[in-house]
Image: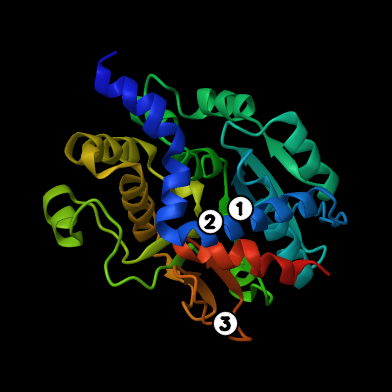
């Protein structure tokens, strides 16, 4: 290993998350963030259990979770339960970091959850998406946990919906329930001016036959897995890796997800009701269905917002 890589692995990589938080929130903000998340973890470990239905005809919310996110998953589920109690199921997928201790906390909180371990998903993929036939899709799963939302959750038959853990529900998600009944593909929509793709949408369309829907946010994604042409997805994934590896996993995953949604004529959820927050200054209104907290919005999420679900 060269000196540069050695310095990176010893000094820079282990402090990446700390430096990111200090850069975005400052010392005082980082301390509030840290203390708030610790309080959230402690509260989540002792939350009152919720009842989930075992009705196979009810909507099934899927979460990709792990050691860094299990407590967020608890409050995401609790917030849904407060809006549609006993009317939904939950399936948890591990990002590879979920240990037995944290899994037991999730199962104690929501006894009816279905858990898909990495080994269970690997076995399912071996049978349905062979590594010999789809090597790029398998590579992506190891490349970054982002792709487990795209592959692990949506490789199961039927209409599948995944929710990110860093979101809270404040009104019934009627549009999601309606989409489930109709088996309509849907997605959460960013409020950013520019879509977060590897390249300009016209370049992707004209040069590579990749049509994308604008401003897709991965917080809420649902579509029919039975309609996916995985041979085509493998080819598109290989193309993006060959052409745009330097763009990073987030942009590649976002592009592939948007491509799949476009092929199923997915409908965007209303931005005002299904809101993505990026900044620590939140514009809160009473009729918001869900609030998704990313980037700087993590500060009010950990210090204030999750506490609104504790009742």
x and y percentages locating residue 97 in the rendered image:
60, 32
Mark 2 is surrounded, within 10 Å at the Cα level, by few (under 14), some (14 to 19) or many (20 or more) other residues, namely some
* Dot 3 alpha-carbon crowd within 10 angstroms: few under 14, some 14 to 19, many 20 or more: few
Residue linked to disc 2: 30
Q: Considering the numbered disc 1 on the image, is that residue within a helix, a strand or a loop? A: helix
Q: Nearer the viewer, mark 2 or mark 3?
A: 2
Q: In this view, which residue lies farthest toward the bottom? A: 286
Do residues under tags 1 and 2 come within 8 Å of each other at their CB atoms?
yes
Q: Quadrant of the rendered structure where residue 189 is?
A: bottom left
| Residue at x 65% of width, y 31% of height | 117
Q: Which residue is mark 1?
A: 34
Horizontally, residue 9 falls left or right of residue 109, namely left
Q: Nearer the viewer, residue 205 or 270?
A: 270
Could you say whether the residue bearing mark 2 is in a helix, strand or loop? helix
Between disc 1 and disc 3, whose residue precedes?
1
Q: CA distance from mark 1 to mark 2?
A: 6 Å
Q: Badge 1: few (under 14), some or many (20 or more) residues near its Cα, within 10 Å? A: some
Side of 91 relative to 239 (left or right): right
Indicate the quadrant where residue 130 lies.
top left
**Residue projecting furthest to the front:** 27
| Tag 2–tag 3 contact (CB < 8 Å) | no
**Disc number lying in front (1 or 3):** 1
- Taking the image as shown, residue 205 lies to the left or right of residue 29, namely left
State left or right for residue 275 relative to residue 301. Answer: left
For residue 149, say whether it is visible.
Answer: yes
Q: Residue furthest top?
A: 1
Residue 83 horizontal/vertical position (percent):
75, 72
Residue placed under numbered mark 3 in the picture: 284
| Res 150 visible | no
């Amino acid at each position: 290993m060269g000196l540069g890589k050695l310095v990176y692995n010893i000094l820079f990589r282990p402090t990446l998350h700390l430096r990111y938080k200090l850069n975005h929130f400052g010392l005082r903000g980082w301390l509030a963030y840290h203390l708030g998340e610790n309080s959230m973890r402690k509260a989540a470990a002792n939350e009152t259990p919720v009842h989930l239905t075992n009705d196979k005809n009810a909507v099934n919310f899927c979460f990709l979770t792990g050691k860094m996110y299990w407590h967020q998953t608890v409050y995401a589920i609790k917030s849904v339960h407060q809006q549609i109690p006993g009317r939904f199921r939950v399936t948890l997928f591990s990002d590879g970091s979920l240990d037995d201790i944290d899994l037991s906390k999730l199962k104690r909180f929501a006894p009816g959850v279905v858990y898909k371990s990495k080994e269970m998903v690997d076995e399912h993929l071996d049978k349905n998406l062979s590594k010999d036939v789809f090597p790029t899709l398998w590579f992506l799963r190891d490349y970054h946990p982002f792709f487990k939302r795209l592959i692990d959750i949506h490789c199961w038959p039927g209409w599948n919906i995944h929710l990110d853990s860093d979101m809270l529900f404040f009104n019934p998600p009627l549009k999601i329930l309606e989409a489930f009944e109709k088996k309509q593909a849907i997605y959460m929509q960013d409020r950013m001016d520019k879509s977060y793709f590897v390249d300009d949408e016209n370049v992707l369309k004209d040069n590579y036959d990749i049509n994308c829907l604008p401003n897709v946010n991965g917080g809420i994604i649902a579509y029919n897995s039975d309609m996916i042409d995985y041979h085509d997805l493998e080819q598109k994934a290989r193309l993006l890796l060959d052409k745009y590896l330097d763009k990073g996993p987030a942009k590649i995953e976002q592009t592939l997800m948007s491509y799949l949604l476009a092929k199923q004529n997915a409908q965007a959820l209303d931005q005002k009701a299904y809101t993505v927050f990026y900044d620590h200054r939140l514009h809160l209104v009473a009729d918001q269905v869900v609030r998704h907290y990313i980037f700087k919005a993590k500060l009010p999420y950990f210090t204030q917002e999750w506490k609104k679900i504790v009742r």
